[in-house]
Image (cartoon, helix red, strand yellow):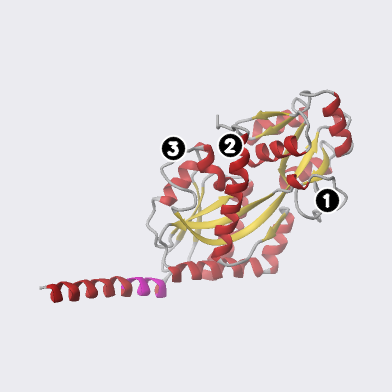
Amino acid sequence: MIKRLASALALGLAAVAATGIAHAQTYPDKSIRLVVAFPPGGATDVLARVLAQGMTEDLGQTVVVDNKGGASGIIGTEAVAKAQPDGYTLLFAPSSHATLKELYPNLTFDPLKDFTPIAAMARTAYIYVVHPGVGAKTFKELLDIARAKPGTIAYASTGMGTAQHLAGEALRRAGKVDILHVPYKGSGAVRGDLLAGRVQTMFDNVAVMLPYVQRKELLALAVTSAKRNPLLPDVPTMRELGLPDVEIEGWFVVLGPAGVPDAVVKRLNASVNKVLASKATAAKLAELGAEPLPGPPEQVAKIVGDDRDRWGKVIREANIKPE
């Protein structure tokens, strides 16, 4: 009896393994859903569509961007966490993914443990802008004003715990300056108030703020990347300004539900890296103020884990809570 049970178990495991191998060999044989957990039009959505187009051409199957917004990205992210780990439902996640658990401790999923790292796509710098009405033409001048009149300079964000908020918190701490955080719900309202001068400063994606800087509706004071941005060669980095702790870069990665077969992960990773190696993709990313971030799946786990540790500490110490 024991021998028969052992034999049956071995046959069952062999069948499962054979099914996995067969799936990997035929993958993909239908369209792939790339979930963006935010509404259309933002940086995450735009970059996801760049990647989806390239992967469609490489894989021979349509990669469809599915915007599933709501609850600060939780709804779409949770949907992917609970999907079948067959490689046909993926998540295109921005850097805010790393801090979800710190901000929302009652999540039904873990942003690291419940996802399979697949590939990194791009990284982006943030730019710190100020309304011309403040009277500061340089970063030093802004700090001088803020220090002379504590609490009078405010920075906007699109919500508590967002990259814009954390960048401002990093500046407040590293620069030892009393600046106020003004969270908004969505990008439309914050842009209007920033351009009207009702809120004076903001950190945001270079590509988002570049048109306003070019029209001189806003002034660029600094970028948060490790080196100067080619789109803004005259704007210094935070490190150059003596604030290396405000060196911040956003990132975008592809994740699957936990348990995606290794062979499928390798196929998807190779596809993303192939897309990133193309001149057309590099040119498009440059237009958006982003840089390709090719590499193995292990790189994704490190990127997400490092930001979880770094910003999780800031969130806890500053007692940052979502609205």
CA separation, marks 2 and 3?
Answer: 15 Å
Q: CA distance from mark 2 to mark 1?
A: 34 Å
Query: For residue 130, what is the image quadrant?
Result: top right
310 sits left or right of 107 in the view: right
319 sits to left or right of 181? left
Q: Residue at (18%, 76%) from the top-left corner?
A: 7
Q: Of the numbered discs in the image, which one, if any, rests on residue 253?
A: none
- Residue at 44% x, 40% y is 107
Residue 48 visible in the current orientation: no
Screen quadrant of the C terminus: top right
The N terminus, quarter of image: bottom left
**What residue is shown with label 2?**
316
Judge by depth and name the residue closer to the eye, 205 or 116.
116
Q: Earlier in the sequence, mark 2 or mark 1?
A: 1
- Tell me the amino acid under the disc marked 2: Arg
Percent position (x, y) of residue 283? 72, 62
Of marks 3 and 1, which one's residue comes earlier in the chain? 3
Answer yes or no: is residue 305 visible: yes
Residue 106's mark?
3
